[in-house]
Image: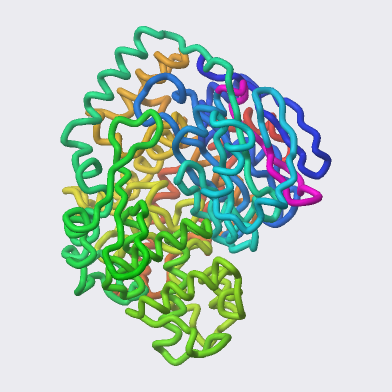
Amino acid sequence: MNAVHNQVLVVDLSTGQTKPFPIPQEVSSLLLGGAGLAAWLLLHFAPPRVDPWAPENPFIVATGPFIGTGITTASKLAIATTSPQTGFIGDSLTSSYLALVLRRTGFDALVILGQAPRWSVLVVENHQAYLRPADDLLGQDPEATAAALRNELGRDVRVAAIGRAGERLVRYAAVVNDGRLAGRTGPGAVLGAKRLKAIAVRGTGRFPPVANPAGVTAAARRLAARSLGPETAKYRELGTVANLAFFSRLGVLPTRNFQAGSFPAAEALAGEYLTLHQRADRQACAACTVGCEHHFRTTDAGPEVTVRLEYETLFALGSLCGIEDPNTVLRAAALCDYYGMDAISAGGTVAWAMECVERGIPLPGDPADWPRFGDGLSLLRTLEAIGERRGPLGDLLAEGSRRAAEIVGQGSQAWAMHVKGLELPGYHPKNLRAMALGFAITPRGACHNRTSAYEVDFSEQAGNPFEQLARATAQSEDRAAILDTLPICKFLRHCFDDFFVEAAELVRLVTGLPFDANELQRTGERIVTLKKLFNLRQGWTRADDTLPDRLLGPDGIEPAELETLIAAYYRIRGWTPDGQVPATRLHDLGLASLLVHAPSGS
């Protein structure tokens, strides 16, 4: 296989020792890299039932074969670990220059084990790695940490860092690089548990060669041209914030902790309004021709804040918490970036607390500090308390909505809006049956990025029988796994006339492997199944594939409908009715031989 180094750098923080680890060729050829490689490495290095806080919990950073090829948007890193929120696989993606630099070290991935004796920075310089004390960086936000390390180590160094939330083990803490957050499932908290403030990388070697350089160059040009067409116009012109008002009109915008699907003040938060009145600039990730990253500035009387804003942040800190003022949402987003926290889980957890107050359920601490729906100052105050784990309220909410509800009790579990411990993203599944299924079954918990099932609901397929909806959801999951493995941005998915056919051609040109559309989709299914296997080893049961009670019934999807969809999905995957993966299915997918290479995952 071309376009890979077939080598991983393993770092033991407890001892400071590093060693290369060869990737079996079969692993590379069956999983390609990226999210697939990260899932396999997690299975290989993690002991069964590993605790997320344990030194033995691996922290994986993996690259994919398209990085450095000139293919547009191919600058993503896959991160995998055991999630402090769910106890299952925690996988996130982050973009930009760090992916390119890591590829030039000669390694396809980093595997970080153990726990540093003191707070440290892992410095990787080509084939060398060492630990630098991080005492002088503690308490700094990720941007300041990166600036300090680049000033010390050189401007060609790229940095991924955690903020105070990661240092204080907020369960949904993020890893931040180049202003991008890998936040979902709490990878920043795992680095905090390992006492690792940052990872600084310098790579000056060559990218691994592709199989057909001329063919890759021509294909990359064609895809770049498509990336500037109508399929990505929304992202270039408004960004994902364009979704908010549209979703409110459809009745699928989560509002006041999913108590409603429309927000009366949606127009005040709409992407169109923000773009006209508050947009500051537009930027792009490394190697990207789309440029979807829109920055907005506050226009109120307070100190000016400029922050990148996405739909998920806008909904989670806006309609979900009943906040109507866009300036408050921008300030809340900036706080999440400063502390290094996933905005979806932060907003979801605060919205749970707001509903507790609304229902008269007492929270810890001074009632004057409790957050309330529509109260922007209380939202900002609560986010600061969470990021610092300040006081009993901040300490409680730093645990996430599931654990907070278990602690508070009094029926509050009924409005903790999570799946497997991961707070729901911005799609109210009422009338979105495929999305409801996607939320329930995705291995990392409620997620809109590991399956784009909502597109099925917004299409002519919405009225299809359950079996067809389940098949379309599984196919969208396979496609997402491939996008995360190559990697290329999901915003390109509609730039292909036939994704699996055209992406398979790119794989052939880059790697030299004889992939066709069927084999590429099977690769996506292998990756999804690997994640499932990790969850099974962590203690997953059939009861974990479900939705919050609030969404089971007239305000969401009827329980019988969801059960029928899940049963159909399991059949399509070739799993047993209780969600187990038979040995015959592992053989069919070629996974049985891969697990031979992973003794801890057998």
Residue drawn at x 63%, y 33% is 153
Q: Position of residue 567 (x, y in %)?
A: 42, 55
Residue 437 occupies quadrant? bottom left
Quadrant of the frame with the C terminus: top right
Q: Which colour style is shown?
A: rainbow
Instruction: Inspect this view and state whether residue 602 appears.
Output: no
Pick whichever, 19 or 450, lies toward us. 19
Give yes or no for residue 106 being in the magenta stretch: yes
Pick whichever, 243 or 204, lies toward us. 204
Residue drawn at x 35%, y 42% is 476
With 589 as the anchor, is 213 left or right in this view? left
Give yes or no for residue 173 being in the magenta stretch: no
Residue 269 lies, with reference to residue 522, above or below; the image says: below
Residue 288 occupies quadrant? top left
Pick whichever, 535 or 104, lies toward us. 104
With 17 as the anchor, is 253 left or right in this view? left
| Magenta-tinted stretch | 104-122
Residue drawn at x 21%, y 65% is 248
Q: Position of residue 347 (x, y in %)?
A: 42, 67
With 447 as the anchor, is 107 left or right in this view? right
Q: Position of residue 60 (x, y in %)?
A: 62, 40
Residue positioned most to the bottom: 360
Residue drawn at x 56%, y 43% is 146
Counting the numbered discs, the total is 0
With 332 as the anchor, is 227 left or right in this view? left
Instruction: Inspect this view and state whether residue 573 appears.
Output: yes
Residue 570 lies, with reference to residue 485, above or below; the image says: below
Q: Position of residue 484 (x, y in %)?
A: 44, 36
Residue 225 lies, with reference to residue 367, above or below; the image says: above
